[in-house]
Amino acid sequence: MRPSFQLTSSSVTNGQPLPLEQLSKMFGVPGGQDISPQLSWPGFPAETESFVVSMYDPQAPTGSGFWHWAVADIPAGTTSLPAGAGAPGATYLPGGAFHLAGDAGAHQYVGGAPPAGSGVHEYYLTVTALSVGKTGLDQNASAAYLGFTIAGHTLARATLICPTPASAA
């Protein structure tokens, strides 16, 4: 098990469902807005060179889960992202950081959208501290390949889990 550090948010609460703002307008959730949550991550290892931020739903009925958001190459001097940093065009991301296309094919944050009748989905918002400054990937890499690529460079992870019932969609 890798070491952890702290991950906090003024938008979402660990153990609580995703708010409407973090649910998906793109996938037709009534009131969904596809706004990425604010995130802050103090206490990461001193040797951190960069970060990856992601949101993953392992309960998505795909056979492989669903990547809602993936941001790579966030500089080590960055310790937070504002709400909305996952908007198309990445204007809120620090220099050098970029969105990968999640499983919806969009280079942006795509909110939760648990399909009706599929039970509770656990949305894992994760910040991963890396021992390298760059992943060596570009925006065309898949989020799963990003995970494979960073596995050997991961120093620590911090995660918030937001269990959201399908009735929210």
Image: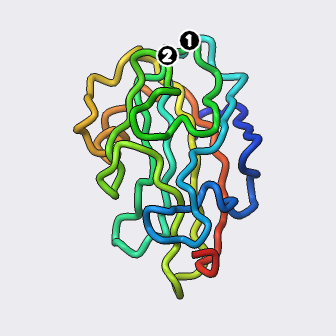
Q: Quadrant of the N terminus?
A: top right
Q: Nearer the viewer, mark 1 or mark 2?
A: 2
User: What type is the residue that disc 2 sits on?
Assistant: Pro
On screen, residue 161 above or below 83: below
Residue 39 rendering spot, x and y as whole percentages: 66, 36
On screen, residue 70 above or below 56: above
Q: Real-space Cα distance between discs 1 and 2?
A: 12 Å
Q: Nearer the viewer, residue 30 or 12?
A: 30
| Mark 1 or mark 2, earlier in chain | 1
> Residue under circle 2?
75
**In the image, what residue occupies the spot 42% across and 23% down?**
97
**In the image, what residue occupies the spot 57% across and 45% down?**
36
> Residue under circle 1?
47
Residue 72 rendering spot, x and y as whole percentages: 41, 30
Please identify the residue farthest to the left as the structure is shown. 140
Label 2 residue SS? strand
